Amino acid sequence: MTRARRRAVSGRRPLILVLPAVCALAFLLAPMLGLALRAPWRTLPDRLLTTEVGAALRLSLLCASLATVICLLLGVPLAWLLARGEIPGRGLLRAMVTVPLVLPPVVGGVALLLVLGRRGLVGRYLYDWFGVALPFTTAGVVVAEAFVAMPFLVISVEGALRAADPRFEEAAATLGASRWLTFRWVTLPSVLPGVVAGGVLCWARALGEFGATITFAGNFPGKTTTMPLAVYLALEHEPDDAIVLSLVLLAVSVAVLVALRERWIRGPV
């Protein structure tokens, strides 16, 4: 097929496809545009510095960052195990790891309560032996966010590990490097872009978590009220504050997508 003919074929845009596509685009962009148009831009800096908004913003950034650290420490080894480990039932294990992606967050919060609550399967021992109670605490927010965000990191890193050339690791092994040294100095640097991408997605997902957080950690201002929870509360008595916090979350989401556009949006050329 000649270049002119390919251009002619690719340039055809059936109206029956264009109209639904435009409607879908409007359906997705209109709410975000409405949020930007209704935002109190003149008072936005002052509202960001108010006690309630500032506390929710600081708590959200802190908890999302701590949750991301936990996900990195636990999720990278798990991704390596799924990609390189020869273990029985690896397919089933991979499916179970990705369950939080499709599980309703509220159900995840209930599951965390049943396991880590004061009378939970594990939580009862944490409380009786060490006096540690995770539900309805700031630590509970971190745990809930890590639970729903870790699959994003695991999937990203596992994909990077599967795409990496194993010959470099084999060469390091033939030179006498241990498995740990090989992972630290060969494997990890080769998949670092995947780790970074997964970490950013993980952080953004943790920042926007609502269902599991409110179920497992509750909604206590200054203690467990993150930005999504603050948006929910502000809608009742101060809608402008809700719009400001929503804009912050929207800006973070857009920034993440822009930063990772080469990897996640454009795809292979």
Image: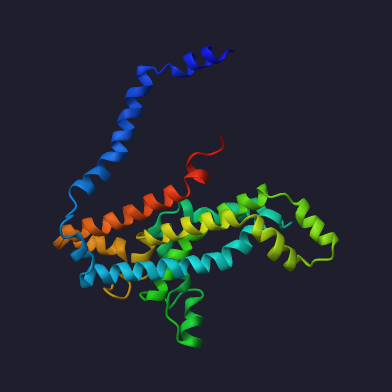
Q: Is residue 88 left or right of residue 201?
A: right
Which residue is drawn at the image coordinates 71% and 60% (left, top)?
Answer: 186
Q: Nearer the viewer, residue 118 or 173?
A: 173
Which residue is drawn at the image coordinates 35% and 23% (left, top)?
Answer: 18
The quarter of the picture where the N terminus appears is top right
* Position of residue 172 measured from the top left corner of the image (x, y, whole percent): 79, 60
* Position of residue 219 measured from the top left corner of the image (x, y, whole percent): 29, 70
Q: Nearer the viewer, residue 2 or 209?
A: 2
Q: Is residue 244 above or below residue 218?
A: above
**Colour scheme employed for the rendering of this structure:** rainbow
Q: Is residue 188 above or below residue 29?
A: below
Q: Is residue 89 visible?
A: no
Q: Is residue 218 left or right of residue 34?
A: right
The quarter of the picture where the C terminus appears is top right
* Position of residue 253 measured from the top left corner of the image (x, y, whole percent): 38, 52
Task: Give residue 51's quadrant in the image.
Answer: bottom left
* Position of residue 114 measured from the top left corner of the image (x, y, whole percent): 45, 69
Which residue is drawn at the image coordinates 48% and 65% (left, top)?
Answer: 68
Q: Nearer the viewer, residue 186 or 230?
A: 186
Which residue is drawn at the image coordinates 65% and 59% (left, top)?
Answer: 189
Q: Is residue 255 visible?
A: yes
Report how many numbered discs are placed on residues in the image.
0
Q: Is residue 207 left or right of residue 198?
A: left
